[in-house]
Amino acid sequence: MARPLRIAFVAYRGNMNSGGQGIYLWFLAREMARLGHEVHVFVGPPYPDPMPFARVVHLPNQQFWAKWVLGQTDQIVPRENPLQVLSPLNFYELVASRIGFLPELFAFSFRAFRRIAEELREGRQFDLVHDVQCLGYGLLGLRAMGLPVVTTVHHPLTVDRRASFIRDESLLQAIGTMKFYPIGMQSFVARRLDAVFTSSEVGRRQIIQDFGVAPERLRNLRNGLDTELFSPDPAVPKRVDEILCVGRSSDPNKGIRTLIHALSQLRTHARLVLVDDDSPDNKVRRWAREVAIEERVELTGRVDTAALIDLYRRAALVVVPSRYEGFGLPAVEAMACGTPVVATRAGALAEVVESTGGGLLTPRDDAPALAAGIDRLLSDADERARMARRGRERVVASYSWPRIARATADAYHDLLAQRRRSALPSDA
């Protein structure tokens, strides 16, 4: 049996509401601890939920970028100790945020480097560092100190930048998009780490193409899901006229406008529950009015995990109309809850749906085809039931967190064994 490892996770944001990286960090760290590994987590704000299975080290920052975006300019200089904004990393973040850069990843990586280097000097040991989607220059400092460093990238930032260009409505906004994303840094660092993990074959190809990472240094380990939490409940009745979508209309990659047009073309009078911002100025309301279906669209606002699971369980089917997905977590969550999926053939969604058999695929950006797929499943209860059973079984077999953690731990051991072999004298 392979020996337990001392793993240092580094994550620039740790909270589950901050995006997929927070979910990935919490569950993978938990499963590594369950496998007997010693887990240390170096994390920036917003911080994760309690992690009693790990030693957690908070690496605070002033969150200047968030304050600029939210208009909290009166909170930028801390009242308790205003001079702390003059420390090098704080001052860099302050200036970079003001001129439109995203400085968080660069600054966090150096805070993590500084803290881990201090602990190494004090005698603490780590077998490897696992970065979660930061890819800041500070990681190269850790590697220069002799630590193996791997990273997880579900999809490269180039995908987000292309989506931002779609949203931009002026040259000034396009220039802002060009400045904002630290793609040069991330691609430079990714090419120099020991390994890059990703969650789909399409993500793997995108990282090779956009970041120039050598194929032999990339491993598709898939993403995970808590299949005990996301599970069917026969006591929750299905609403046969309700379809569910989880996605932000503000992100063009989520394809929500295509879904609204598809809803207007259904043969059935199904209604859509959309887990998205429920503010009056959400564009979904205008899109629905334009095709005369506003009364058939419900916006939930933010929901907690328990409420989301209940929505998955009661829906007749879940629609994922994305233009791109590096993994497609809502599709996997839906199938784990025993609900079939209609998804677009975009990004990793085709891999997920075809490998599980828990749904059907339609072309991307094609509202009539999406409507036809939804109609097909809404009109066939037997097919929905077959897909629900098959999807649940195969999600548990392929995407449960214990399986993903074991595969990740095997990748760690393979990397460490490879480093030991390369360190041996050539005549050994």
Image (cartoon, rainbow, N blue to C red):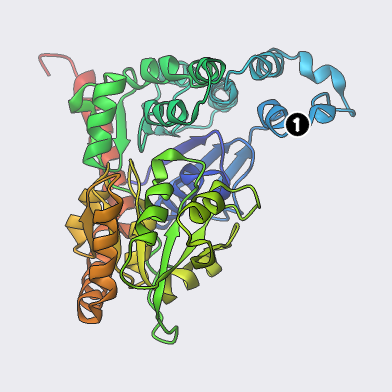
Residue 198: percent from left, percent from top: 30, 38
Query: Residue pushed farthest right?
Result: 79
Question: Within 10 Å of the Cα at label 1, are there few (<14), some (14-19), or many (20+) other Cα atoms?
Answer: few
Say which of 271 and 193 sits in front. Answer: 271
Query: Residue pushed farthest left?
Result: 427
Q: Is residue 367 above or below residue 300?
A: above
Residue 113: percent from left, percent from top: 54, 22
Evaluate whether residue 1 shows in this view: no
Residue 274: percent from left, percent from top: 49, 60
Q: Is residue 372 above or below residue 215?
A: below
Three-letter residue code for mark 1: Gly
Query: Residue pushed farthest bottom?
Result: 235
Say which of 140 and 279 sits in front. Answer: 279
**296 lies left or right of 316:** right
Q: Which residue is mark 1?
A: 71
Q: Is residue 254 above or below residue 234?
A: above
Q: Quadrant of residue 176?
A: top right
Q: Mark 1 falls on what kind of element?
A: loop
Evaluate whether residue 242 shows in this view: yes
Q: Residue at x 25, y 34 (%)?
A: 204
**83 lies left or right of 357:** right
Q: How many marks?
A: 1
Q: Is residue 246 above or below residue 242?
A: above
**387 lies left or right of 224:** left
Image quarter in which the C terminus is found: top left
Q: Residue at x 42, y 14 (%)?
A: 184
Residue 296: percent from left, percent from top: 49, 67
Say which of 190 and 99 sits in front. Answer: 99
Q: Residue at x 64, y 47 (%)?
A: 281
**262 lies left or right of 29:** left
